[in-house]
Image: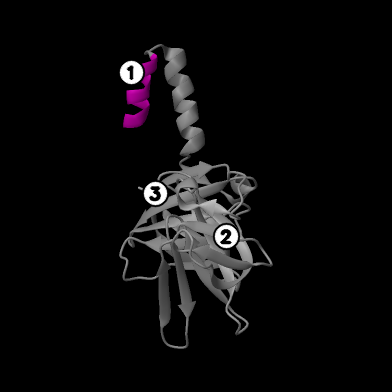
Amino acid sequence: MALVEQEAALRGTSDESVLKLLREFSAACPPRISAADLAHRCAVVDTESPAARVYLAQGASRVTVRYRNQEILPSSFSAKIKRCEVAMPLVVSDSNGIDRRIGVAQSIRVFTPPEFTLNDVERKQMGDLLCAVFLDDERGGVDLCLIDHAVTVYRAGRRTTQVLRHRYSRIARCEVGGVLQIHENPGTNAIALGLVKEIVVLDASSQG
């Protein structure tokens, strides 16, 4: 609401202007959402208990969680929204039909995912884009890879998860059915990180 007040001060304080700002704010930061609201949009939900940032993919079929406590590794799984409302527990139903509570929602932000390609993209072109890329782990499973201004791969083993973080100057190739290839520095050979099975936009605005 403070942001609305600041914007109103810049634009003028007519009732019509304030109402327009409130409608814009409510559309971008609704108090609650359902799966139907994400048919063509994505959502970012900040939670407490635990403190996390939860990404709800377009179509509301995948949930990705990044915890504020960096000792807890991110997770990503197929799920459907059961309840997503500010000041209430965020509850999703996973692919096994089990309800999972992911903290208490503190804020909800929705956005329309941009059209983009990750082929031949320099790091400076990424802006605020955050993507989850799912890689074939060659064991019949999937490794989670998060791409923003770094490429972080989480490779789950039987007992531990290996975390591989790469700085990069350019993403040479990243498309479904192809091998994810990055250049760590200009002029160096590309590093292959695995076969891409799926690409999901998580966020396209400030990570905060």
Question: Would residue 71 be seen by someone viewing this image from the given angle?
Answer: yes
Residue beneath disc 2: 172
Give the side of residue 68 with respect to residue 148, left or right.
left
For badge 1, the amino acid type reads: Ala
Label 1, residues with CA under 10 Å away: few <14, some 14-19, many ≥20 = few
Q: What amino acid is found at the position of numbered circle 3 in the picture?
A: Gln
Q: Residues within 10 Å of mark 3 (few under 14, many from 20)?
A: few
Tag shown at residue 207: 3
Label 1 belongs to which residue?
A: 9
Q: Is residue 1 visible?
A: no
Does 10 appear in magenta?
yes
| SS state under label 1 | helix
- Please determine whether, in this image, residue 71 is positioned above or below residue 118: below
- The picture places residue 154, in percent across and down from the top left corner, at 46, 73
Q: Position of residue 184 (x, y in %)?
A: 45, 63
Residues packed near mark 2 inside 10 Å, few (<14), some (14 to 19) or many (20 plus): some
Circle 1 or circle 2, nearest the eye: 2
Secondary structure at badge 3 equals: loop
Q: Residue at x 61, y 70 (%)?
A: 95
Q: Nearer the viewer, residue 182 or 178?
A: 182
| Helix, strand or loop under label 2 | strand
Residue numbers of the magenta segment: 1-11
Q: As shown in the figure, which amino acid type bears the numbered disc 2?
A: Ala
Position of residue 93 in the picture relative to residue 67 (left or right): right
Identify whether 26 is placed above or below 96: above
Q: CA distance from mark 1 to mark 3?
A: 26 Å
Marks 2 and 3, the one that precedes in the sequence:
2
Can you tell which quarter of the image residue 1 is in?
top left
The percent position of residue 162, horizontal first and vertical second, equals: 42, 79
Residue furthest to the right in view is: 177
Q: CA distance from mark 1 to mark 2?
A: 45 Å
Residue 8 image offset from top left, x and y in percent: 37, 20
